[in-house]
Image: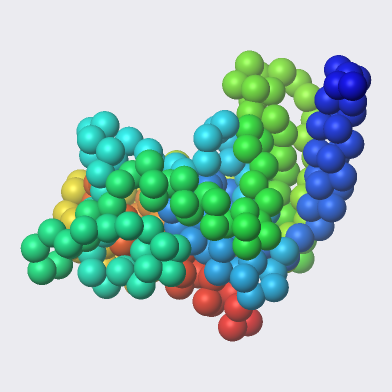
Amino acid sequence: MLQELHVTRGIIENFFRELLEYTKIDVAIVGAGPSGLVAATLLAENGKKVAIFERKLAPGGGIWGGGMLFNKVVVQKEAKHILEKFEINFSLYGEDYLIADAVELAATLISKATKAGVKIFNGVHVEDVVIKNGRVNGVVINWTPIEMVHLHVDPLVVEAEYVLDGTGHDAAIAKLVAKRTNCCDVKGMGAMWVNEAEKLVVEKSGEIYPGLYVMGMSTAEVYGLPRMGPIFGGMFLSGEKVAKAILST
């Protein structure tokens, strides 16, 4: 017989078991957008214990809306292998472009990440970082609604060997570390220039302070790169680059 108490206990027991398990991890990724999901999947497939902390309820970042709510996105041919690896359908558009469905793309990236062993904590806001001996060593977390209504509730800590800023246009973690350490100048991204943006965001993604990596639009925000709109190959390749960098250390 179904009982309300068993429903409640099942949720609480299983969630808190996972939360305890993920208080010490290899890689903490802030933001479940395209670069974060790609990086997380590749890291988890190679044996890293990975958690993504997403402040919104729905992971996927800016993928869902496509361009101006037309739920299609563009991927350049250089990132075709990412779509193929994740088994995402696409069609050709001219010689240099691939078109994918935004909803399928977001849903598949999320599914592949979780099936690879990535734990996604949605509704969780990263409000600060842990820094010890000149290195980022973890993230400071609280529930997003706590942050939204400005309640004075102390946060908790997740220890991590690496922290990846995948917060997109906000570059929230890079800005926190820049404020704490004066490590870098977050310049703010420039106007749209797709070709340069897609190239430079991959080129510049990487470690900006010991233990802290930027990728995706966070990279553009930190280095003052152009924005690129609803083309996502650079996001994928950026996440791939950061994952490979961590795996090679």
Against 46, residue 184 (above or below) is: above
Looking at this rendering, what residue extends furthest in the front direction?
1
Q: Quadrant of residue 102?
A: top left
Residue 173, x across and y down, in percent: 56, 48
Disc count in the image? 0
Name which residue lies at 28% across and 52% down.
100
Please name whichever residue, 39 or 150, is drawn nearer the observer in this view of the structure. 39
Please name whichever residue, 39 or 168, is drawn nearer the observer in this view of the structure. 39
Name which residue lies at 76% across and 60% down.
25
Q: In this view, does 64 lie to the left or right of 165?
A: left
**Residue 139, can we see it?**
yes
Name which residue lies at 86% across and 17% down.
4
The C terminus: image quadrant: bottom right
**Residue 172, can we see it?**
no
Please name whichever residue, 71 or 161, is drawn nearer the observer in this view of the structure. 71
Residue 95, x across and y down, in percent: 10, 68
Please name whichever residue, 247 or 103, is drawn nearer the observer in this view of the structure. 103
Residue 83, x across and y down, in percent: 36, 64
Residue 167, x across and y down, in percent: 49, 46
Looking at this rendering, what residue extends furthest in the bottom direction?
248
Against 91, residue 66 (above or below) is: above
Name which residue lies at 70% across and 30% down.
143
